[in-house]
Amino acid sequence: MDFDFDPADESFREEVRSFIHDALPADIRERNVRNYHANRADTRRWTTILHERGWSAPSWPVAKGGTGWTPMQQFIFDEENFAAGAPLLETGGLKMIGPVIYTFGTPAQHERFNVPFLRGEISWGQGFSEPGAGSDLASLTTRAERQGDEWVITGHKMWTTNGHYANWLYLLVRTDPTQKQRGLSLILVPADAPGVTISPIIDIGEGHSLNEMFFDEVRVPAENLVGEENKGWTYAKFLLDRERAFSAEIPRNKRNFALLKQIAREARRGGRPLIEDGAFAARLAQLESDLDGLTWMTLRALARQGDSSWDLPVGSILKVRGTELQQTIGEMHVEALGDRGAYVYPEPDFATGEHHWPPGPDYAPGVLADFLYRRAVSIYGGSNEIQRTIIARQYLGL
Amino acid sequence: MDFDFDPADESFREEVRSFIHDALPADIRERNVRNYHANRADTRRWTTILHERGWSAPSWPVAKGGTGWTPMQQFIFDEENFAAGAPLLETGGLKMIGPVIYTFGTPAQHERFNVPFLRGEISWGQGFSEPGAGSDLASLTTRAERQGDEWVITGHKMWTTNGHYANWLYLLVRTDPTQKQRGLSLILVPADAPGVTISPIIDIGEGHSLNEMFFDEVRVPAENLVGEENKGWTYAKFLLDRERAFSAEIPRNKRNFALLKQIAREARRGGRPLIEDGAFAARLAQLESDLDGLTWMTLRALARQGDSSWDLPVGSILKVRGTELQQTIGEMHVEALGDRGAYVYPEPDFATGEHHWPPGPDYAPGVLADFLYRRAVSIYGGSNEIQRTIIARQYLGL
Amino acid sequence: MDFELNHEQVLLQDSVRRFVEKQYDFDTRRKLVREGGGFDPKHWAVFAELGWLAIGLPEKHGGLGGSAVELAIILEELGKGLVVEPFLPVAVLAAQALAAAGVTGEAAQVLADIGTGAARPVLAHGEIDALGEIAFVETAAVRGASGWSLTGRKSLVVGAPFATHYLVSARTSGAPDDPQGISLFLLQPGDAGLERIDVRLSDSSRASEIVLSAAEVPAARLIGTEGNAFAALAAAHAHATTLICAEAIGAMDKALWITRDYLKTRQQFGQPIGNFQALQHRMADMLIELELSRAQLFGALAALGSAPAVRDRAVSSAKVQIGKAARLVGGQAIQLHGGIGITEEYVIGHYFKRLTMINNAFGNVGYHLDRMSRLAAV
Amino acid sequence: MDFELNHEQVLLQDSVRRFVEKQYDFDTRRKLVREGGGFDPKHWAVFAELGWLAIGLPEKHGGLGGSAVELAIILEELGKGLVVEPFLPVAVLAAQALAAAGVTGEAAQVLADIGTGAARPVLAHGEIDALGEIAFVETAAVRGASGWSLTGRKSLVVGAPFATHYLVSARTSGAPDDPQGISLFLLQPGDAGLERIDVRLSDSSRASEIVLSAAEVPAARLIGTEGNAFAALAAAHAHATTLICAEAIGAMDKALWITRDYLKTRQQFGQPIGNFQALQHRMADMLIELELSRAQLFGALAALGSAPAVRDRAVSSAKVQIGKAARLVGGQAIQLHGGIGITEEYVIGHYFKRLTMINNAFGNVGYHLDRMSRLAAV
C-alpha cells in the first residue's frame, strides 16, 4: 500500500491547469461555471481547442486519437476542466459510442465517426430509454427490422441528453423480439434522417437538455450496425463498467461544495455570517467528510481500473452517494441563498449573452436551475434503487 | 376543532401528581427512575398502593374494578406515573389478557384472575412469539390438544417479558393445525405447572427481563381456554388496536429527553457546556420537535380512541417513530456521558439495594443498560419493517 | 380537545376544495403562470365572494372573526391545488400584522378592505441578511419635517406585483437585530423613492424586491406606535408560518397520493412498481412525515393565542417538522416517479418546487432549530 | 498510489486472521471476559512473539519501523475478532506518544519493552470534561523540591488494569484548554498518591479512572520537555484515531457478513428474509457505509505524516465517516437479526457494543465535525 500522490501526476495537474487557464475563452467559462445546461457551440469550440493540443479524447488510447492517459490523469483532467468552468466533453461520443466503435466496430466506422468527433464535428445523441422502459432496459420495444441492405427503425426513445444538438444518434434497438437483453443491437442513425422527430423535454429547472425522439420507419444502411447483431447490451454494459470510477462526479461535487462554502461565508443570518452558525458549519463539515470518502474511493477505483477480478460494486456505490451528495449540496445552495434562493434566474440567451436576472449576488444565477435539474441524477443511468438492488443481489448474494 | 386542554384534565393531572408524589416509596422511585428493568416486588407494592386508591387498572371500566378513566386521563396518569419514577403497571394483565378475560371470558375467570390481579397478586407472562415465528405469528407451532377435559400443551415460546416473575401465563397456541391465524386459541397456564420450564434470556444490556418457555405435555383444565376456541388471533388483534394511541411511549420519551437535557447542561466539552455547542443544541431541538409531533399525534389518537371508522394507521406510525426516538435519545445519552458512557454500571441487587458502580455523575447508572436493551423496541411488537409494510399495504393500498 | 372539523368547517373545506378541483386544474394553473402573470383577478373575486379573505379578520374591522383553524382549512386546500395567488401574504401575513398593530384611520380601512378584495396589502419586511430572523431590520426610517424618510431594501415580498399597499418595516432606533425600534409604515405603489423590482419565483408565483431611496412617508402613515412594531410582526409571522405549514400539508398530501396512484399503474420488470417493498416502505415514510406534520400543525394552531415564547416554540417545532417532511415527501415524490417527475410538463415537480420554497420561507429548519434552542435556554 | 497489500502485508494479515479464527472464537472470548478479567497473558505473548507489538515502534527503539498501514492491517483483523486485550492503547496510543515525545533513559526503555511485551504502558490523558478535546488538561503538576506533584483525575484509561506504566499528562502552565503547558510524566502502579479505580466497559474490555492526589513524581520521570507534550499527544491521538477506524472497519465487515448469512437462512413468511427488498437495500446501505469508511481510512493513513492541520483534518473526516457508519452498520445488524440480535448469548450485539464505544472514543462525530470546521476556518 502506498498513498502518496505520484509527483508526475502533480506536475501533470499543473500542466493541465495552466493550459486550461490560458486556453479557455472567458465567455465560455462565464456560462459554464453557472451550471446551466451546456451549449453545443461552447462544447464544440472547447473540443476544437483541446483537439489542437491533442487532448480532445482524454480516455482514448493514442492509437485511436486519444491521449493515452492513465485513469488518474483522466481524473485529474476532469477535475481541472470542471473546476475552471470549462464545458464537459461530450459523454456520448467520448465514453459511450466512440469506444464501442473503435473496439467493436469497423475501421471504416472509426474513420467516419470518431475522427471527426475528435475535432468536435460530431455531436451524438443516445437512444436507450423508452417511455415504458426506464430502469428496465431489457424490455425495450423500439424495433429495427432488416429489409434488404437497410435497417428500418420504428419506436420512441426518451431522455436523450442534448438530442437537439445531435447530428448523429446511437440507438439500442430490438433486432430479435424473441429475446430480452440478447435481442438488442446498436445502430447509428443520422439525426436528420427522414422519419426522425426530436422534441424537447423541458425540465423543472426550466432548462432544455433532454429530448424525446420518435422514429417512424427510419431507414439506415446495414453498415450502420455497430459490432455484431444482438450484442448491443453487451457493449453497453462493457462501457458502463469501464466508467465506474467516475460515477461519483467528484469534479462537479468539488466545485459545487466550494461554491457552497463561498455562499455560506457571504450569507448572513440576522446579520451574522451563516458559516459561523455551529449547526450549519457541522452540516458543511459533514459534506466535506462525505466528499473525502467518495474521493478516496474514486482514487482506489482509478488504481484498479480495468481489473475485472475486483468485484466490489464500486460504480454503484459511487453513483448512489455521489448523486445524493450533489442533491444535498444543491439543497444547501438554495437554502443559503435565502430569499434569493427562490428567485428564477433564467438561462441567458447563449447567442447574445443577454440575460434578464433579478437582483442577487454574482453567484446566484444558475444555482436554482441546477438544483432542480439534479433531481434527475438519482434517477438516470440506473436509478439509485436499481443500484442498491445490484449491490445486494450481485455482491452480497441476497 | 378545539385544541384547548380540558381544565378538568389539568386538575386531574394535579391530583394524580400529588397522589404519586405522596404515595410513591422513595426506594421504588430511586430504582425505577434509572430505567433498569422493573422488579416484581416494586411493581407489586406499587400496584397494591394504587389499588387502595382504586387506581390499579386505569384502563378498565369501573364495573370491572377499573377507574373508568377517559383515554386522556389514562395518558395523563401514565405520564405522571412514569415521570415520577413509579414502575409501569403490568402490561400483560392490564392491557392484554385482563381485558380479554373480562370481555370474552367467563365471569368466573374474571373473578379468578382479574380481581386478584387488581390487588397486585397475579403477575402474567405472555407466550406469543416462538423461535421460528417472530414477526410471522401466523406460523406459530406450539400445540394445544384437547384430551378429555384437559388441554395438553407442547412447544417453545420466546421473549416473555418478566416470565421469571409470572405466576400465570397466557399462551397463543395452535388448536387447529389446518388453519393459519384462525387455528389459534388463548389458554391460561400456571407458571408452576408440571412440564413448564422458564429460562432467562440475558439482553445485551446485561439485564434480565426476557425469558423463553418450554412446554412439555403441560396439562391444564379445559376451562382455562379464554373465549372461543380458534379465536385467539381475533382477541389479540382487538387489544392491539385498542392500545394504538399509546404506541409512541410518550411518557418514557419525555422523561428520557428531560434526562438528556440535564446531561447536556452538565456535560463539558473542552470545559464548555455541551448544550452551548450549536450543532448539539440543534440535535436536541430536533428531538424536541420529534417529540412534539408524536405527542400531538397521540393526543389526536386519544381523542379518537375506539373510533373504528378512523383508518389512519396511527398505531404503526407512533410505533415506528416512537421507538426510533427512544433509540436516538439513548444514543445521545451515552454520547453526552462521554467517557462515563462506556462504563458498565451493573444493575443493583434489588433485595439489598447494594450496587458496585464505577465513578460517575448521579444520573449515569442505568443509562447504558437501557440504551442497549432498547435496541429491542424496534423489533418487538411487530418490527418497524412490519409496521411500514402495514402502512403501505393496508392504508396506501400498495 | 377535538380534532374534528365542525359543520361550518366542513362546508368551508368543501367550498375551497371545489374551487381547486373545478377552477384550478393543472392546465389552468399552467396557463395562468405562463400567460396570466400569476394572478387572476377573477380568482381573487372568488376568494372575496366566498368570504375566505374576510374569515381571518377581526369582526371590528369588518371581518368574520374566524380563527386560524379556518385559515388552515383554506390553506391546506389551496396547497393541494398549488394556488399561486398571494392569499397567504395578503389575507394572513399582512392582515395579521395590521390587526396586531392596532390600526386606526387609513390603515384600518386597508385592513377592512382586505375582506372585500378591494385592498391587497403585503408586508414588506424581510431583508436579505435576516434569513428568517424577524427582529433583523436594517432599512432605516429617519424623521423629517412632515413625516419619515425611508431607505433600504426589502426582499422576497411575495405578491407585491399585485399589491395595493405595502406595509414596510423600518428601524427608527436600535441596532439591526434589536426587537425594539422597529416601526411599520403604509406605502403604496407609485410612492416617490419606492422602486419595485418584480421577480418570478421557483414555484411560479411572483414577488418583488422593494428598494426605498429616501422615500417620503407622511407621519400619518406610521402604523401603530413608533418603535413598537416587533410584537405585531412576530404575531403575524407566527400566524403565517403556521398557515404555510397547513399549505405544505395540502401539497404533501396531494403529492403523496399522486405518487401512490402512479406506483399502482407504472409497470417495470413485469409488475406495478408499487409492488416493490423498498418503494412501499418509502411511501410509508412519506405518510409518516405527512401525518406528523399534521400533528404539529395542530400544536402550532393550539399555541397561536399563547404568550410569545410558548407560541414561537410551538411554531418553530412545527416548521422544523414541515421542513423535514417537505424535503422527504417532495423529493421522493419525484424519485418514485422516475424521469417523468423532473419534467416541467408533469405536475409532481411543481409540488417539489412549492415545498422547497415553503421550507425556506419564514425561516428554514436551521433557523427554527436555533430559535427552539434559544427559547429553551431562557 | 497503490491500494493493494504487498507480500509481507498479506502474510501479516494472514497471521492475525489465523490467530483470531483459531484462538479467539466467540466462546473463548466470552470465557475470557467473564472469567479471565478481560486479559490473557498468553494472548499478549502471541502478540509479542509474532512481532505485532514491535511493528509500530521506531527502529532506533528496537522496533520494526513499520508504518501505520501495518498497524491498520492488525487492527482490522483484531476488530473482526472483537479482541479485548489493549493492543491499541499500548502498541499504538502509548507507543506513539512515547515515540513522538522523543524519549531517553527510562522512558526509552519502556518504549523498547513494548515490543517484547515486557512493558505495557498506557496513556492516562483523557479527562471527563475534555470529551475529545486533546488540549484540555486540568490535572495539575506542581514543581516541588525533587520533582513534581500531580493532582487530578484521568478517565477511561483503557487497559490500565493490565498496565505496567502510566504516561500521565498534566498541566504545568496555561489555561485548561491551552495546547501549550502540557507535560507528560511516567508513573507506575503503586506510586504513592495514585489511585486506580478499575471499571468494566460496555464492550467487555477494562479500563480505569486514575486519581492523582499530590502524587510525587521524580524530575527524571518528566518525558520530553516541560510544557511541550501537546504535539506528541496530538500525533499519538491522530494515530490511535486512525487505527481505531481500522478496527471499526474490521468489526463492521464481520457484522455485515454475519448478518448477510443470517438473512439467507432465517425464514419468515415462507422464505428467507434476505429476499425482502427493503432488507436488501438496508444491507446495500451498510455495505456502502463500510466501503466509504475503508476509503476514508486510506485518506487518514495517507495524511498521518503530514503537517498537523492537514493530518487532523483527514483524521477527523475519517472519524466522522466511521462514526456514521458504525451507527448504521451496528444498529442495523441487530435490527435485521430481530430478537436474537439483542441477546448477550449471540455475537452480533457485541459488535454493536464495540462499535458504539469506538464511535465515542477519541472524540465523537460532533467533536470531529467541529474540529473540521475549525480547521477549515484557519
Image: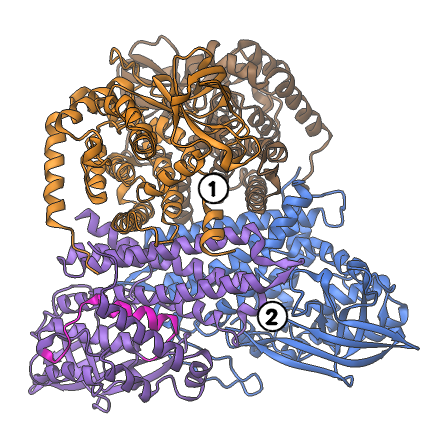
Chain colours: A blue, B orange, C purple, D brown
Is B262 one of the magenta-colored residues? no
The image quarter containing residue A179 is: bottom right
Instruction: From this view, report whether residue C78 is shown above or below residue D256.
Output: below
Which image quarter is the N terminus of chain B in?
bottom left
Front residue of C93/C209: it is C93
Is C65 one of the magenta-colored residues? yes
Q: Amino acid at mark 2?
A: Ala
Per the rendering, the mark at residue A86 is: 2
Q: Amino acid at mark 1?
A: Lys
Counting labels gives 2
Instruction: From this view, report whether residue B84 is shown above or below residue A296.
Output: above
Front residue of A171/D122: it is A171
Which residue is found at the position 66% from the left and 80% from the top?
Answer: A164
Q: CA distance from mark 1 to mark 2?
A: 35 Å
Which residue is found at the position 66% from the left and 37% from the top?
Answer: A1
**What chain is tagged by disc 2?**
A
Query: What is the x, y in percent for residue B117?
Result: 26, 23
Q: In the image as oriented, which residue stretches furthest toward the right?
A: A148
Instruction: From this view, report whether residue A118 is shown above or below residue D5.
Output: below
Which-is-in-front pick, marks 1 and 2?
A: 1
Query: What is the x, y in percent for residue D210?
Result: 33, 18
Q: Which residues are magenta?
A: C61-85
